[in-house]
Image (cartoon, rainbow, N blue to C red):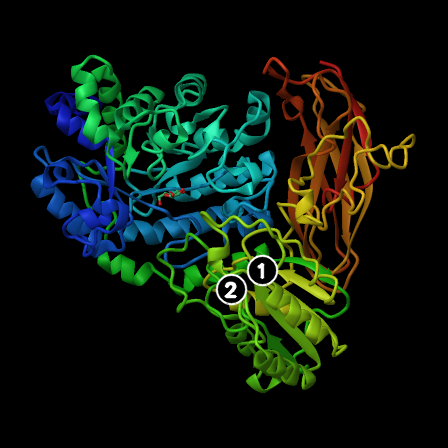
C-alpha cells in the first residue's frame, strides 16, 4: 500500500476502530492462538469484549507459527477492513536458541557476534510469526541491586550505544519488508529505567537533564539512528513525571528534537500506572496524559479503549492526535509488508528446521565462550584431562542457565555444566555432588560434597543465583551469594585442595566468601543453551577466556553505585596533598570496586608498550592517532580487548576521570605482537555543558590505553585548539 492508500484507509476507520489500533492485548484474548480463553489474574478483570478484540491493532506473547497464523486468520475474518495484527514479543537474547544474557554479550566486546545473535534470534522468531521484538534493552546501569542489569550491556554510554546499534542491525537487517527473517526493533525502556533509586525495580528516577543526556540517553539515540522502528516507554518517572505521561521526554525530546516518527508503545500497564504514580486521578486522565505525551500503543490496559472516544467527543483530546498515532501504526504494518502478507515469515517448516539448528547452537556456544570473564586464576586453570574433578554446587547439573527473558527457550535443551564436562573428559574423571541448593543446605548434602571432594585433585564449584533472583522485579539488597553456597565453599576450603568457582548469575555480585577462598573464578553469567559446553571449553583450555567486564563488581553493596567513569571530587583519596581522613573515602572499605570495568584475565599474558600520540595538538580538522603495541608474551593464543580512555582535565562541568572512547578486540598468537591504532576526533570530546549545549572545549586532555579501566599505561596528553 502507498502512503496515500494508508491515509485513505485511516479515513475509512471509525473512531472506535482507530482507538482499537492503539490497543495491544496478550495472546489469550485471541482465537486461534491455542492459548485463547486462558485469561487469568488482572487480565480477567479487563472487561475485554469481542467487539474490542476485533478492532485490536496488535498482540503480544505468542508461541509459534501455528498460533500466530491461527490468530491472524481469525482476526482478519473479524476485522471489518481486514487490518492485520502486529505480532510483538520479547526476543531479548534468543528465541529458542538462547544466547548469553545481554550483560554477558556486552562482556564479549564483540559487536559482530552480538549482531549475529540478534540476527539468529530474529530468524527463529520470525519463523514463529513474530514481527516486532521488544529489544534491544539499552538502559544504562550502575546499580547491581537492580535485577534487570542482566538485560543491558553495562555502565558505559559509548559501549552501550555500540551494542545497541549492533542489536538493531541484527534484528532489522537492511530490508525489513522483504527480508522475512528479520524483526522490527523496539528500543527500551525510554528513559533511564536503569537508574531507579536503591536499585529497586520500577522505583523513582530523578536526575538532572544534563546527567540524563550525558550518560543515560546516548544508547537510545544510537538505536534510533540505526533505524529502530519503535520505542517503549519506561515504568519510571523522569524528573517527576512518569515516562508514559511525559510530554517533555516524548514529544519535545524524542519526536521534535530527535525527529523520531516511529511507533511509541507503553510498557505493560504503564499508561494505567499513571494513577498509582499519582499524576492521574483516574483512567480518563491517564488516557488523556498518555496520548498527549505521545504514547501510540497502550500495552495491556484499556484507558484508551474506555475513555479516548469520550475525550475526543468532549473536545479534550484532538482527534488528530489519534489519527497520527494510528497512521504511525499503519505505516509500521506497511513497512513489514503485512497488508500484502499478514502471515509474514510465519512458517511451520522453517520454524522446525531453523529453531535450535546446529548452526544456531554453534553461534550460541561461541558467544558464551566470548562472554565469560576469567576474574581470578592462580595457576589452577586450565584443568588437565587427567585430573580428577569434583564438580560440586547447585549449578553442577542445572538447566537454569538460560537466564531471565528466555521465555521460549527450554531448560531441557540447555547443556548443563556436568554434561559439558563429560563431553570433554571421560565421566570417570568427574565426581559430581549437589553440595547444596541455591538457598539451602543440609548436613547430608555437605557430607556428600566433602566425600566427593576428598577423591578429587581439583574442586570445581558451580555456584550462582537462580534466574528468578534477577530479571524483572528481581532486585536484591544483599549482593552476596546465598549463605548456603558460602557455607559449602567454606567447608570445602578446609580440604586444602585447588578450587575453581564457576558463577551463574545475572548481576555483579559482592564475591566475598568466594573469590577470597578459591584459586580461580570464572564468571559465566547465564550462558544460554550451549552454556555447559562453552564453560567446559574454557575450563579445559580448548578456548581461552576473553571476556572483559562491562559493569563493575562492587567490593561491597555499600559502595553502590560504583562505576569507572566517576568524578574526582574536590578531595580525592590518594591525591598528593590528601589528608589521611578528610578525603572522599570509606572508613571500612576501599573506594575501588573489587573488579573494574574492562577487567578480565586470559590464559596467556599480554604486554603493552610503545604507546604514542601523533601530535600534542588537536584541531577541528586535525584528529589525532593514538597507537600502542600489544604482544602476546605467553604460550597460548588469546584475544585481548585493547581499550582507549580519555580525560578532559578541566571542563565547564566536572568531567569523569576516564571515559571509554575506543576499543579493539584482537587475537594474538603466542609471541605475536601488533600495533593498535585509535583515531581520536574532536567529536569524541564533546559533552553536555551546564546549558545543555553539546560541545567540546579547548584545553588539556589525558589519554590512556590499557587492558581495562584501572591498569592503564602512563597517560599521554594533548591540547584541543579549535
Ligand atoms: C515487561 C517489561 C518489558 C517487556 C514487556 C512485555 O513488563 O518491562 O521489558 O517488553 O513487559 O513483556
Which quarter of the picture shows residue 385? bottom right
Residue 126 drawn at (x, y percent): 30, 49
Specify which label sits upstream in the sequence, 2 or 1: 1
Q: Is residue 111 above or below residue 689?
A: below
Mark 2 residue CB less than 8 A from any atom of ligand 1: no
Residue drawn 55% across the image and 50% down it? 476
User: Label 1: which residue?
Assistant: 524
Tag 2–tag 1 contact (CB < 8 Å): yes
Ligand 1, by image quadrant, is top left
Quarter of the N terminus within the rendering: top left
Q: Quadrant of residue 715?
A: top right
Q: Quadrant of residue 18?
A: top left
Which residue is more in the foreground, 362 or 689?
A: 689
Q: Which mark is residue 149?
A: none
Residue to which mark 2 is pinned: 531
Residue 363 visible in image = no
Front residue of this view, candidates 171 and 56: 56
Q: CA distance from mark 2 to mark 1?
A: 8 Å
Frontmost residue, 13 versus 630? 13
Badge 1, how many Cα within 10 Å: few under 14, some, many 20+? many
- In the depicted view, which residue is nearer to us: 548 or 51? 51
Residue 245 placement (x, y as % from top left): 37, 25
Amino acid at each position: 500500500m502507498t502512503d496515500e492508500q494508508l491515509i485513505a484507509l485511516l479515513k475509512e476507520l471509525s473512531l472506535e476502530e482507530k482507538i482499537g489500533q492503539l490497543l495491544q492485548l496478550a495472546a489469550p484474548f485471541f482465537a486461534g492462538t491455542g492459548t485463547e480463553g486462558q485469561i487469568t489474574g488482572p487480565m480477567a478483570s479487563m472487561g475485554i469484549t469481542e467487539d474490542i478484540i476485533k478492532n485490536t491493532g496488535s498482540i503480544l506473547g505468542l508461541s509459534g507459527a501455528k498460533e500466530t497464523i491461527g490468530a491472524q486468520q481469525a482476526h482478519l475474518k473479524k476485522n471489518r477492513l481486514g487490518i492485520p495484527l502486529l505480532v510483538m514479543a520479547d526476543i531479548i537474547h534468543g528465541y529458542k536458541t538462547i544466547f548469553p544474557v545481554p550483560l554477558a554479550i556486552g562482556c564479549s566486546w564483540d559487536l559482530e557476534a552480538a549482531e549475529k545473535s540478534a540476527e539468529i534470534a530474529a530468524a527463529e522468531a520470525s519463523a514463529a510469526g513474530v514481527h516486532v521484538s521488544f529489544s534491544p534493552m539499552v538502559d544504562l546501569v550502575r546499580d547491581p541491586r537492580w535485577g534487570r542489569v542482566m538485560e543491558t550491556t553495562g555502565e558505559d554510554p559509548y559501549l552501550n550505544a555500540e551494542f545497541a546499534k549492533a542489536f538493531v542491525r541484527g534484528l532489522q537487517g537492511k530490508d525489513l519488508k522483504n527480508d522475512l527473517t528479520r524483526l522490527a526493533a523496539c528500543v527500551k525502556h525510554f528513559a533511564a529505567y536503569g537508574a531507579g533509586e536503591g536499585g529497586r525495580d520500577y522505583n523513582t528516577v530523578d536526575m538532572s537533564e544534563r546527567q540524563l543526556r550525558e550518560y543515560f540517553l546516548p544508547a537510545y539515540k544510537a538505536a534510533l539512528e540505526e533505524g529502530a522502528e519503535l520505542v517503549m516507554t519506561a515504568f519510571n518517572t523522569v524528573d517527576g513525571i512518569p515516562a508514559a505521561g511525559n510530554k517533555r521526554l516524548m514529544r519535545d525530546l524524542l519526536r521534535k528534537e530527535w525527529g523520531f516518527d516511529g511507533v511509541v508503545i507503553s510498557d505493560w500497564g504503564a499508561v494505567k500506572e499513571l494513577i498509582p504514580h499519582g499524576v492521574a486521578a483516574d483512567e480518563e486522565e491517564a488516557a488523556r496524559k498518555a496520548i498527549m505525551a505521545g504514547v501510540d500503543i497502550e500495552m495491556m490496559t484499556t484507558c484508551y479503549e474506555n475513555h479516548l472516544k469520550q475525550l475526543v467527543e468532549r473536545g479534550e483530546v484532538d482527534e488528530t492526535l489519534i489519527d497520527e498515532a494510528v497512521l504511525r501504526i499503519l505505516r509500521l504494518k506497511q513497512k513489514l509488508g503485512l497488508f500484502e502478507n499478514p502471515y509474514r515469515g510465519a512458517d511451520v517448516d522453517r520454524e522446525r528446521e531453523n529453531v535450535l539448528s546446529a548452526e544456531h547452537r554453534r553461534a550460541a556456544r561461541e558467544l558464551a565462550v566470548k562472554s565469560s570473564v576469567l576474574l581470578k586464576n592462580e595457576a589452577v586453570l586450565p584443568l588437565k584431562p587427567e585430573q580428577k574433578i569434583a564438580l560440586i554446587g547447585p549449578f553442577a547439573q542445572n538447566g537454569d542457565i538460560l537466564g531471565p527473558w528466555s521465555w521460549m527457550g527450554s531448560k531441557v535443551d540447555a547443556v548443563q555444566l556436568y554434561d559439558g564436562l563429560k563431553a570433554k573428559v571421560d565421566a570417570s574423571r568427574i565426581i559430581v555432588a549437589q553440595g547444596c541448593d541455591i538457598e539451602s543446605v543440609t548436613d547430608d548434602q555437605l557430607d556428600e560434597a566433602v566425600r566427593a571432594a576428598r577423591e578429587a585433585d581439583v574442586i570445581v564449584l558451580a555456584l550462582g543465583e537462580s534466574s528468578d533472583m534477577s530479571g524483572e522485579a528481581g532486585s536484591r539488597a544483599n549482593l552476596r551469594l546465598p549463605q548456603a553456597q558460602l557455607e559449602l565453599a567454606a567447608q570445602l576450603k578446609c580440604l586444602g585442595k585447588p578450587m575453581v568457582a564457576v558463577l551463574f548469575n545475572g548481576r555483579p555480585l559482592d564475591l566475598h566468601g568466594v573469590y577470597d577462598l578459591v584459586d580461580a573464578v570464572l564468571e559465566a553469567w547465564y550462558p544460554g543453551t550451549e552454556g555447559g559446553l562453552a564453560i567446559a571449553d574454557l575450563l579445559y583450555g580448548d578456548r581461552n577466556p576473553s571476556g572483559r567486564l562491562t559493569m563493575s563488581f562492587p567490593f561491597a553493596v555499600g559502595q553502590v553505585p560504583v562505576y569507572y567513569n566517576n568524578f574526582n571530587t574536590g578531595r580525592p583519596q590518594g591525591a598528593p596533598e590528601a589528608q589521611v581522613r578528610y578525603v572522599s573515602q570509606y572508613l571500612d572499605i576501599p573506594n575501588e570496586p573489587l573488579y573494574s570495568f574492562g577487567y578480565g584475565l586470559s590464559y596467556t599474558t599480554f604486554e603493552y608498550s610503545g604507546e604514542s600520540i601523533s601530535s600534542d595538538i588537536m584541531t577541528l580538522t586535525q584528529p589525532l592517532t593514538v597507537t600502542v603495541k600489544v604482544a602476546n608474551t605467553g604460550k597460548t593464543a588469546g584475544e585481548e580487548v585493547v581499550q582507549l580512555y580519555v580525560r578532559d582535565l578541566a571542563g565547564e562541568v566536572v568531567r569523569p576521570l576516564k571515559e571509554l572512547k575506543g576499543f579493539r578486540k584482537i587475537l594474538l598468537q603466542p609471541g605475536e605482537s601488533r600495533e593498535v591504532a585509535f583515531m581520536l576526533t574532536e567529536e569524541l570530546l564533546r559533552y553536555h555543558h551546564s546549558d545543555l549545549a553539546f560541545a567540546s572545549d579547548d584545553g588539556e586532555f589525558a589519554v590512556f590505553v590499557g587492558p581495562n579501566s584501572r591498569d592503564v599505561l602512563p597517560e599521554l596528553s594533548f591540547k584541543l585548539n579549535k
